[in-house]
Image: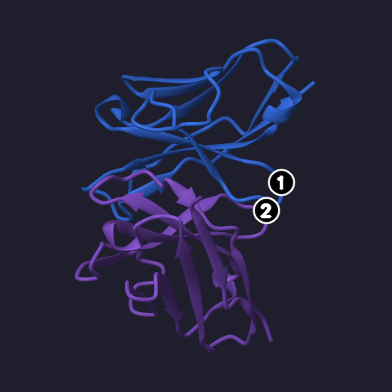
């Protein structure tokens, strides 16, 4: 059974940093592209970032470019999102999602972790 | 950036058919994926590549895509289908390249 389990969310002050993790199991993690998607309270889904199978290629939404860094450790079956210079508008549930390499639909999703940016 | 527009809400009686539209410029030339999100839960892929169903998704869920509109159809609607539904495309010329629709709340009367 495919499982994606996010962790690392919490309350952080504006300008602060947080690192999210997503532990994967039940599939060959190193063969899949991985994404982060976020959802502000009561709002819709917004794509944040993508990393390819071996970590050599990444892409970001303009809203987080230069502040967020996506990475992965295939030996540990874990995806990361380093978030710096956090703003109030980054407050959201952050989901990790998997995609078959080279495809563009989000096949499986984690349960999400809440990030709240507030003083 | 590429924009996908969905109706905010759709209401349907049990046993009837719900149709959720997703409008975008020449969306028929793109592959459309659909997600179901129940309150407090993560999204679930219900249709990919316009009309394919992942394993475990009932045949009552179907999709089509042509021109400027993609449509998710839920036949013989059940109470358990009440959820938010989002369409999504990948557009290599857009930034961001992964785009979600605005979302539609399906209410089962």
Q: Nearer the viewer, residue B39 or B101?
A: B39
**Image x and y of residue A101, in percent:** 26, 51
Colour scheme: by chain
**Marker disc for residue A42:** 2
Q: Is residue A63 above or below residue B30?
A: below
- Callout 1 and callout 2 share a chain: no
Quadrant where the image shows the C terminus of chain A: bottom right
Question: Tag 2, which chain?
Answer: A
Q: Is residue A24 left or right of residue A11?
A: left
Q: Is residue A9 above or below residue B89?
A: below
Q: Nearer the viewer, residue B25 or B89?
A: B89
User: Which residue appears at 42% of the width and 29% of the height?
Assistant: B23
**Image x and y of residue B99, in percent:** 39, 47
Chain ID, blue in image: B
Chain ID, purple in image: A
Q: Is residue A26 left or right of residue A28?
A: right
**Image x and y of residue B70, in percent:** 41, 24
- Foreground mark, 1 or 2, reads 1
Question: Tag 1, which chain?
Answer: B
């Amino acid at each position: 059974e495919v499982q994606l389990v996010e962790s690392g969310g919490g309350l952080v002050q504006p300008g602060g940093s947080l690192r999210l993790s997503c532990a994967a199991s039940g599939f060959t993690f190193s063969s899949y592209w991985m994404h982060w998607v976020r959802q502000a309270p009561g709002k819709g889904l917004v794509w944040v970032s993508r990393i390819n199978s071996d970590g050599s290629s990444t892409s970001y939404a303009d809203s987080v470019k230069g502040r967020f860094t996506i990475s992965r450790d295939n030996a540990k079956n874990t995806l990361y999102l380093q978030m710096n210079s956090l703003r109030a508008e980054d407050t959201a549930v952050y989901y990790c999602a998997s995609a078959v390499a080279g495809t563009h639909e989000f096949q499986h999703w984690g349960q999400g972790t809440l990030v709240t940016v507030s003083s | 950036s590429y924009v996908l527009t969905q109706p905010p809400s759709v209401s349907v009686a049990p046993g009837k058919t719900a149709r959720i539209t997703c409008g975008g410029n020449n969306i028929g030339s793109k592959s459309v994926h659909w997600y179901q999100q129940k309150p407090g839960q993560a999204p679930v892929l219900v249709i990919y590549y316009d009309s394919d169903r992942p394993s475990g998704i009932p045949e009552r869920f179907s999709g089509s895509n042509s021109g400027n509109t993609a449509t998710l159809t839920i036949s013989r609607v059940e109470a358990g289908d009440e959820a938010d539904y989002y369409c999504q495309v990948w557009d290599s010329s857009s930034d961001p390249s992964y785009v979600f629709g605005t979302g539609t709340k399906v209410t089962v009367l």
